[in-house]
Amino acid sequence: MEKPSLDTAKAGAMRFNTDSSQMEIYDGNQWTGILATSPELQTGGTRGLIMGGLSAGHPNGDNVMQFITISSTGNSTDFGDLTREKYASYGGIASRTRGIMPGGYYYPGSSGTYTDEMDAVTISIQSNAFDFGNLSQGNRAEPGSASNETRGIIFGGRSGPSPLVYTNTITYCTIASQSDTIAFGDMAATGGGGYQNPTGTASQTRLVMGTGESPSGAGSGGGDSYNTLEYITISTLGNASDFGDATIAASYRNAAGNAVRGIIAGGYAPSSNNTIEFITIATLGNGKDFGDLSNAVGGMTNMASSTRVVFAGGRTPSEINNMDHVQIASEGNGIDFGDLLSTVSNAASVSNGHGGL
């Protein structure tokens, strides 16, 4: 039987829970379990997955998933297949064990369909995806997404194609349980107008999201790209609050990072650009210059370990199969990492070592 403590525990205190046989740490509010695992134990290093996208020979979307080991360099390897060919799902949701691709476009015939499906995989096992659940409140094509170990957050996007409706809603799912998403709150930047292809990056407690496109008459630019950044506390429900501004107003950017820094790169402003910038997630403020990508590119996808971000694919405006990487703690230009299986843009991506874990 557990004996009561004589003093209130301080944040960072540790104990062994004899009921669950697990080490726990006090986060200032509650005791939480300490994971006895790591990307090194699971997959020999942090694994990044690139999921679907527009690829060579698949202009309406692909079902191929491929993976890399982020701590090394080299070309990607086949992982398995999504449940259907699709693209236009920005970011991705992942715990240490599970990766999820929310929404996107797919083509059952001559016209495109916006899907509310979520595909999931076990990151350590090379296999095909399985159905996780469905999106709610219009977060279908071109939503942004990010996560910590427990919750996946999906924000912005569109439903359609007829009628075409932009959304500013934020929804969430519990990664360990297969279910539909639940309302979380609203993004703030467009005053209810909604927007598509936002991006985001997270620590264990906070998610910073922003950039993208808004419909005519909403947001900064009235139908153009914007540079607004905002944030939420992942464990609570509520609307987003202002964080600061990115260095450029651009669409189809992508973000990833560790628990301290978020890296935002590329995008169309209005033509493709090679900008890399960073934010400090725990503090409010504007983006700061980090360096340059090897190519001016939009529509790429990013994956992170605790030390490194890999930027994959995109358009220059032609689709490319290049991958760049940077060290998160130091500013500098992108360095060649390797090549994807084929040219890929507008894909989703996840890793089992990102900053939210």
Image (tube, rainbow, N blue to C red):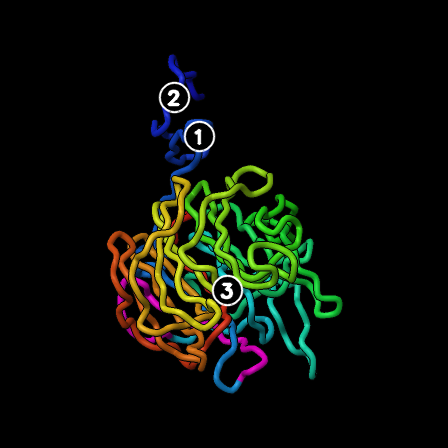
Q: Residue visible at 39% across and 53% down?
A: 354
Mark 3 belongs to which amino acid?
Ser
- Which quadrant would residue 85 be assigned to in this image? bottom right
From the top left corner, tell me how far across and down residue 154 is, in percent. Answer: 57, 53
According to the image, label 1 marks what residue? 31
According to the image, label 2 marks what residue? 9
Asked whether the residues under the numbered discs 1 and 3 touch, taking CB atoms below 8 Å apart as contact, a structural biologist would say: no
Mark 2 belongs to which amino acid?
Ala
Give SS at disc 3: loop
Q: Earlier in the sequence, mark 1 or mark 2?
A: 2
Asked whether the residues under the numbered discs 1 and 2 touch, taking CB atoms below 8 Å apart as contact, a structural biologist would say: yes
Res. 251 mark: 3
Q: Earlier in the sequence, mark 3 or mark 2?
A: 2
Asked whether the residues under the numbered discs 3 and 2 touch, taking CB atoms below 8 Å apart as contact, a structural biologist would say: no
Give SS at disc 1: strand
Q: Residue visible at 42% across and 17% down?
A: 3
**Quick one: label 1, few (<14), some, or many (20+) residues within 10 Å?**
some
User: What is the magenta range?
Assistant: 58-76
From the top left corner, tell me how far across and down residue 18 is, in percent. Answer: 41, 29
**Relative to 343, residue 158 above or below:** above
Of circles 1 and 3, the one toward us is 3
Distance in Å between CA atoms under marks 1 and 2 = 9 Å
Quadrant where the N terminus sits is: top left
